Every structure is written in C-alpha cells, then in structure tokens.
Image (cartoon, rainbow, N blue to C red):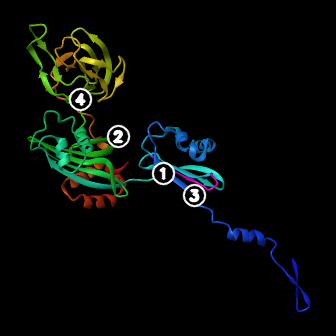
Amino acid sequence: MRLVRASGAVALLLLPIDLPDRMARAFAPTPSPNRTLHGQVSKNATLASILDNVIGRPRVHDLVETARPVYDLKRLAAGHPYGVSIRPDGQLAGFSYGIDDLKTLRVLRKDGQLRAEIVERHYDVKIDMAAGTVRSSLFGAIEDAGEQDQLALDLSEIFAWDVDFNTELQKGDSFKVSVEKLTLDGRFVRYGRILAAELKTGPRTLQALRYEAQSGPGYYAPSGAPLRKAFLRSPLKFTRISSGFTSARFHPILGRTTAHYGIDYAAPLGTPVNASADGVVTLAGFDQGLGNTVKLRHPNGFETQYGHLSKILARRGDRVTQGTALGLVGSTGLSTGPHLHYIMFRNGGYTNPLKVQLPPAEPIPDQEREDFERVRTVAMRLLNADPASVTTALQQTAPPATPVLRQ
C-alpha cells in the first residue's frame, strides 16, 4: 500500500502485493517446447546406450522399471523404431517403442509419474482374388499375377498332400485363390488366411476351402474330404529321383544286383529332411549300409526310414509332427553322392512310397456337416464371383454361418 497526495488530500492507492511476481512472469521468456528424438534401434544397442547421454542413467533405470510390468525393454530388437520426448528441465516426458506392426509400448508422464501401456492397432482386412497360369514354376506364376512369394508357399502347403510341386507342376497349369490381405494405413503388410483355392494340374482340378472345425482349422475339398493326408508326397525338396523302388538294381558300390526297396532323392548336401507324417522316432543312429539314419513309427501300421544323412536332428523316443526336421541330406554309409534313401513300410513289409494309397485325415463330423455346407457355398462364390460382393455378403451373415472368417 502506498500514500499518494492529490489536490491537498491524501489518497490511498492499493496495488496487488504480488505485482512484481506477475510482471516478472509477464516479461519472462516462454519456456521452450519439449525436445524430441526419433530413431531406429541399431544392432547390439541397448536402451542405456541409446538414452544415457540424453536423460542420464538414473532416468533410464526409472523408464525400464516403469515399463517392466507391460514390456521388458531389455528385449529391444534391431530396426524397430523408438521415440523420446524430453522436457526443458531434463525430465522424461514420454517414450515410445514399436514392438511390431500392431503393438507399441508407450510411457508417458502423468501427474508427475511415469505410466506405461501397450497401444494396439488392428489390420484392415480385405478379401482379394489372385489367378494365374504356370509358365515355369508356381513362384513365377504368382509373381506374374502381381503377388508375393509367400502366397506361393501358402498355396503349395494347402495342396502338398495331393501335388508334389517339385515334379508334378507343368507349364499351362493354373491357379485361383481367394485370400485375405492385411493392410495398415493403406499399406500392404502381409497375407492373412487363404479362404478358397483352386489348382488345375494336368487333367486334375483340385479345390480347397478353409473350414474352422471344432477340432481346429483345416482345408477340405468341396465334398468334405480333408486335403491333409497322413503322409507328405516327399519328405524334402529334391533335385531328382536317382533310383526308384525295384527288386533288382545294380548296386554301384557292391558291384552286384540287389533289391532297392526305397526311393533315392538326389538333393544338395545339407538339405533338410522332414518327417512325412506324425510319428515316434524308433531309431536315430548309424547303420552300416544306410549310414546315419532315422526311423519313425506312424499310426495305421506305417513306418518310414530316412538314410544316408549327414546329420541327425532327432533322438530315439521323440514324438514328432509332420514336417519336423529329422536330419540333413548327406552321403554316409554305402553311398556315391548326397541323396536321401527313403523307405516306407506297411505292416512290416516294404511298400513303394510313390504308389501307396495314403490314408486320409479325419473327415467333417456329421454334427458339423450343415455348418460346413454353408461355408462351402461362400467359398465357391469366392472362387467364381467378385470378391467385393462376397465380402459384403460375409459381413451381413451371422457368425455361426461363416466360421471361415473366425479368428
């Protein structure tokens, strides 16, 4: 309070007691905005090596401990993006780390405390159609159709029990496939599920549809027969068949005619050899003639044996699933070059793997037949109609009638 004399009188002039502070704030420079840094995790980098010189080790430790309940920041992966925001006083305002395409770790300072959460996005899913004709290989036909190699791998896996893609696919064969395409912000990321497919090879036309049975998803012919058989047509990617199944073959090492009750698949040294069906390993060791060998026992009286391996990757007693790597192609035992000697037994006797009638997997259960037929109707429309119109129909259909789209 100050006394002021005016016209012979004393007047009181009241001023706020905090005026100096207000004036100081009014003329003080505006605080600078947060400083932000963005980058990608480099090879062998840790959070400490990235942020120690930015916010200091103690604050890096606080960040790690805050994030730990939702994500362990020790698991940084090279190439993944990160961002950090630092306040003018040096305190961490926020941190983000891209775990994958859909998940981001976000740590923000709220009410003076750091809080962590996982922010998750979702793919946009579109059903699209691809079709093409084989000129040299399925991969080439897929590329000609403007698609990526992964689609060829997925398609060949569906028909792997009926077509040996190493030898049977010929020029002029064709395919059609209805597939989910997953995008983020309009950018293609990857393929989803193949919903329906058709492969024409020689005189045969094979069709497949995806059905989510109660026992699990699988691919079926329109009749309801499963495409998955009990055995793969070949247990490896081979160059050629160097010797077939015969009772009389001249042995190049023994120098005499002997039986050859198996198939020799020539392949580069080190090519993976896979289990042709689910089974139990009954032998994994060295045999004088077959060298390093693995033998499996399968259901329904079948056994398979894999000889001349350079390396064995299974142990006796292991229970393996179809496609499990059992070993690597080699030339051990009585062998003149790298190849797999593949033997199949049925009820204790030799049988020709190329001619055996392969037992099918379980068919559609009777109680699911009506549901399967609804899915079949949609799948055939996918193969023979505009995918956009089918997508609309699927979205308007109750979930029980469209298990083909269930996650």
Q: Earlier in the sequence, mark 2 or mark 4?
A: 2
Q: Nearer the viewer, mark 1 or mark 2?
A: 1
Q: Nearer the viewer, residue 91 or 187?
A: 91
Q: How far is disc 4 from disc 3 in space, using C-alphas?
A: 62 Å
Number of numbered tags placed on the structure image: 4
Viewer can see residue 67: no
In the image, what residue type sits under mark 4? Answer: Phe
Q: Is residue 392 above or below residue 47?
A: below
Q: Which mark is residue 231?
A: 4
**Start-end of magenta stretch:** 81-90
Q: Label 3 belongs to which residue?
A: 34
Q: Nearer the viewer, mark 4 or mark 1?
A: 1
Q: Earlier in the sequence, mark 3 or mark 2?
A: 3
Q: Earlier in the sequence, mark 4 or mark 1?
A: 1
Q: Main secondary structure of the magenta part?
A: strand
In the image, what residue type sits under mark 3? Answer: Asn
Q: Nearer the viewer, mark 3 or mark 2?
A: 3
Q: Label 1 belongs to which residue?
A: 38
In the image, what residue type sits under mark 2? Answer: Gly
Q: Earlier in the sequence, mark 4 or mark 3?
A: 3
